[in-house]
């Protein structure tokens, strides 16, 4: 609160998103929201699949004016996103970064998890590096594999 009894304005830092079109999720309206000692990621997520999504992994890169990534941090987050649902989400995992003037933030989803499948970007680090360097010809490849860890239990058939 400020002296006049008003809340201090929320500081939001927008993010550039490297969309991976073969993932079953679209991420938009991304920003880092400043808290007392860290940042929180807020975004709008759309599930483009027929499966409920339960988690994702993303990479967040801090890029300087020479297009060099100073910091790349990778985070795993849990979520509940029903099929074909869009939701505004704030991930509560604190992100500790020191962002200087002139630096840009780039976000890339690297993995999406449902109870049935996991979609993973192959060579995600290389694809993100090419994107940051301005080489948009590198298209990330995604593989989908069965999720044997989080798969729902099958029903027993009694004969």
Image: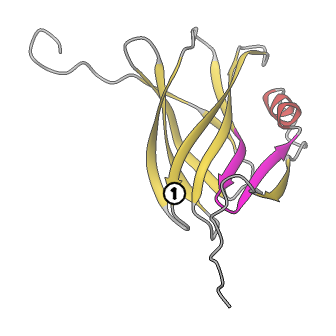
Residue at image coords 62%, 64%? 152
Q: Which residues are magenta?
A: 109-122
Q: Which residue is mark 1?
A: 81
Residue 118 higher or lower than 70, as above or below: below
150 to the left or right of 3: right
84 to the left or right of 131: left
Quarter of the image that includes the C terminus: bottom right
Circle 1 Cα neighbour tier, 10 Å, few/some/many (<14 / 14–19 / ≥20): many
Main SS of residues in magenta: strand
Q: Observer-nearest residue: 86 or 153?
A: 153
In this rendering, the count of numbered labels is: 1
Q: Observer-nearest residue: 138 or 71?
A: 71
Residue at image coords 73%, 55%? 23
Q: Quadrant of residue 47?
A: bottom right
Q: Secondary structure at mark 1?
A: strand
Q: Is residue 115 located in the magenta-colored stretch of the structure?
A: yes
Residue at image coords 43%, 48%? 88
Residue at image coords 50%, 42%? 43
1 to the left or right of 43: left
Residue 105 higher or lower than 150, as above or below: above
Q: Is residue 13 located in the magenta-colored stretch of the structure?
A: no
Residue 70 higher or lower than 55, as above or below: above
């Amino acid at each position: 609160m400020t002296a006049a009894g008003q809340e201090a304005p929320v500081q939001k830092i927008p993010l550039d998103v490297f969309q991976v079109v073969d993932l079953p999720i679209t991420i938009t309206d991304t920003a880092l929201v400043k808290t007392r000692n860290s940042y929180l990621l807020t975004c709008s997520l759309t599930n483009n699949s027929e499966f409920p999504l339960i988690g994702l992994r993303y990479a967040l890169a801090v890029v300087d004016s020479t297009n060099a990534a100073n910091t790349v941090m990778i985070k795993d987050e849990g979520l509940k996103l029903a099929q074909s649902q869009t939701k505004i989400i704030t991930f509560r995992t604190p992100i500790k970064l020191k962002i200087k003037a002139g630096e840009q933030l780039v976000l890339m989803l690297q993995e999406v998890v449902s109870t049935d499948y996991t979609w993973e970007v192959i060579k995600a680090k290389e694809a993100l590096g090419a994107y940051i360097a301005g080489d948009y010809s590198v298209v990330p490849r995604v593989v989908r594999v069965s999720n044997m860890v989080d798969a729902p239990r099958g029903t027993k058939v009694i004969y």
